[in-house]
Amino acid sequence: MEEIERVYTIPLRDTKTVPRTKRAKRAIKEIREFVIRHMKADEENVWIDTKLNELIWARGIQNPPSKVRIRAIRFEDGLVEVSLPEE
């Protein structure tokens, strides 16, 4: 199994349905669930980069972005690294 790299745009529309004091935390959870589903990874093998985390939390806990572009790389050992796409 070789290294797989993909770029996704993840809609975070479900974050608006939770109470506003939990929205950024929910957005991180949605990103993790999306990567698990699309990259066929286990939950403990998904690593979210700190820059992506800071982007979600940049506008506070109550107002995360409505969608986010990510780059996901699955390594041979099953670890998936999620980061911002470097343009």
Image (spheres, rainbow, N blue to C red):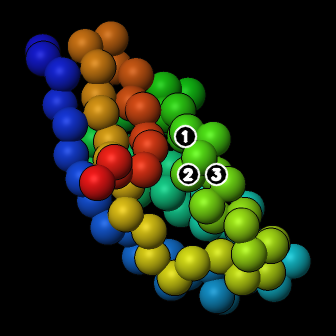
User: Is disc 3 in contact with disc 2, using a CB cutoff of under 8 Å?
Assistant: yes
User: Is disc 3 in contact with disc 1, using a CB cutoff of under 8 Å?
Assistant: yes
User: Is disc 1 in contact with disc 2, using a CB cutoff of under 8 Å?
Assistant: yes
* Residue ID at (71%, 67%): 58
- Determine which residue is flagged by label 3: 53
Does 28 appear above or below 61?
Answer: above
Task: Estimate the spatial distance between the alpha carbons at disc 3 and disc 1, rounded to whole Å.
Answer: 7 Å
Q: Is residue 77 visible?
A: yes
- Determine which residue is flagged by label 2: 52
Does 77 appear above or below 62?
Answer: above
Does 19 appear above or below 25?
Answer: below
Q: Quadrant location of the N terminus?
A: top left
Q: Find residue 48 and name its label.
A: 1
Does 73 appear above or below 55?
Answer: above
| Label 1 SS | strand
Labels 3 and 1: the sequence-earlier one: 1
